[in-house]
Amino acid sequence: MKILIADDEPLARLRLRALLNEIGQCEVLEAEATNGKEALDMARAYQPDLLMLDIGMPGLSGMEAARRLPELANPPAVIFTTAYSEYALEAFDQQAVDYLLKPIRKDRLKQALQRAQNLLNEPPHAEKPSPEEISNKPARTHIGVTLQTEVRLIPIDKIYFFRADQKYVTLRWTGGEALTDEPLKNLEKEFAGQFLRIHRNALVSVAYLSGWKKEFNGKCYISFSGIKERLEISRRHLQSVKQTIKDMSLKTREN
């Protein structure tokens, strides 16, 4: 795997190169970019497999350069390296392989490189997608969140539910909880069929539904397989929940 480093800080480039050399199994280009324009020019000239791209660079920023990479004949995969966590969601919108916060840890870098290698090993598509396919791009398989000082990719199929609370949305998954600032309405639209609206403040994973129950107080609650937590179902959405569980039951019988 051929790698190009792009960072305006000499010490950051030196440290990253040292870590990459320690990990091995990759070719780090001698040429280094110090801004977004140089990153694009070098990516065009050297055709690296992977671009280690800083975001806060003078002139053309790393994020702006990433937006222009698809214009290249053979655009490289991208791993962002930055001291700021607030660009994570935008980074993954640009199809970044990973998002590493400085100072970069060797184990996280190794993990990111493995993801990049897995991506590069995937067979190329035989045909380019049509404009219709581009406009109807498939839902993401992961969501980027910040856990303490680390940006993590949470697999969609590991998420139990999304629950809104004031400005943020809590994401409950098999590894715990995390916060995202993505609106529920956007998540509901993107993951239609995978997640079901049960309340104005909650979306639940259809895959983890185990049933629903009406309590003595008249309120109804959804339950999940794998966790003890329950979420309230609003009257407005109760019928769709009943129908979804009924459909799931019929499919199980058919199989």
Image (tube, rainbow, N blue to C red):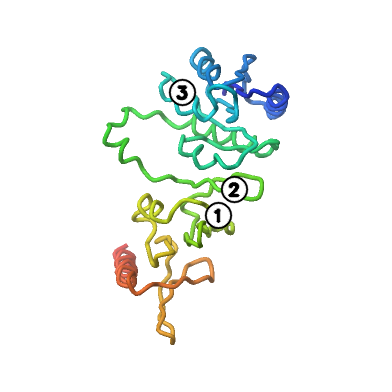
- In the picture of the structure, the residue carrying the numbered disc 1 is 179
Earlier sequence position, callout 3 versus callout 2: 3
From what the image shows, is residue 30 above or below residue 194? above
Earlier residue among tags 1 and 3: 3
Q: Residue at x 61, y 32 (%)?
A: 81
Q: Is mark 2 on a helix, strand or loop?
A: strand
1 and 2 marks in contact (CB < 8 Å): yes
Cα distance between the residues tagged 3 and 2: 27 Å
Q: What residue type is labelled 3?
A: Pro
Label 1 – label 2 distance at C-alpha: 7 Å
**Tag of residue 75:** 3
SS for dot 1: strand
Which residue was labeled with disc 2? Answer: 146
Residue at the far bottom in the pictured view: 216
The residue type indicated by label 1 comes to Leu
The residue depicted at 55 percent of the width and 21 percent of the height is: 59
Would you say 9 lies left or right of 180 here? right
Crowding at dot 2, Cα within 10 Å, few <14 / some 14-19 / many 20+, comes out as: some
Q: What element carries label 3?
A: loop
Query: In which quadrant of the rendered image does the C terminus lie?
Result: bottom left
- Nearest to viewer (mark 3 / mark 2): 2
Picture mark count:
3
